Image (cartoon, rainbow, N blue to C red):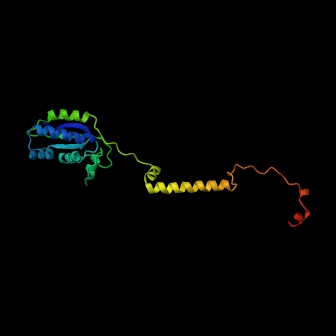
Amino acid sequence: MNPDAVQVRVDALPACYQTLLESLTLAELNAAELNEAFANYVTAECLQCGIQVAGEELGRIALAGAEGSGGDPRLSRLRKGYCAREGCESYYYRLILREHPKVDWSKLAQSLAQTAAAPSVSVPLPKRSSGISLLLADKRARRVLAGIGVLLLLLVVRHFATGGRIPFTHKAPAYTVDPASVSPSVQTNR
């Protein structure tokens, strides 16, 4: 018999693992048989690049959750909803269910297809903050920016208090001096 395959989104892999686990538990497999079933009979394969992820690794993703720590970068990428292979842009995997002596995968494939079709609830990724909002988030940076603002305000007030004008807005003087009104002693000193 050919293996059953179900196409799922990457972010639905943990939910599919849970569905498989529940179904295999209902099929009365003990813990050792469950581990063997996931290790040898369940595989997820990327539709684009063909990278394969074992059923045991799917279990680690599902049990770790969205914030789980792990040293394996492949599992970290899968946990975030991306393909396990860095650089692959695929969002779809194929769950391959190989023939098992105690499990009828065709019934499970239908429930997996329903699980995969259901919209998954994902944690929204934080938006990238701009430089200004990052500065405003830091208490020390806010104090420094407030001090610079106060200093600039004091400089502007001082400029206008000492008779300063806004550059390029003042008019040239419109008066002229009559040469006859200037005393001759001032003219010779030049």
Give whichever of 124, 176 is nearer the camera.
176
Q: Give the residue at the far front of this rendering.
A: 161
Find residue 70 and report its horizontal and vertical position in percent.
25, 53
Looking at the image, residue 120 lies above or below residue 136: above
| Residue 185 quadrant | bottom right
Residue found at x 72% / y 50%:
170
If the image is split into quadrants, where does the N terminus sit? top left
| Residue 44 quadrant | top left
Residue found at x 55% / y 54%:
149
Q: Is residue 34 visible?
A: yes
Q: Is residue 154 left or right of residue 92?
A: right
Find residue 171 and report its horizontal and vertical position in percent.
74, 49
If the image is split into quadrants, where does the C terminus sit? bottom right
Q: Is residue 142 left or right of residue 55?
A: right
Find residue 179 and report its horizontal and vertical position in percent.
89, 57
| Residue 21 quadrant | top left
Find residue 164 and report its horizontal and vertical position in percent.
69, 54
Q: Give the residue at the far bottom of this rendering.
A: 189
Count of all numbered marks drawn on residues in the image: 0
Give whichever of 82, 181 is nearer the camera.
181
Give whichever of 160, 177 is nearer the camera.
160
Residue found at x 35% / y 44%:
125
Residue found at x 18% / y 45%:
55
Q: Is residue 99 visible?
A: no
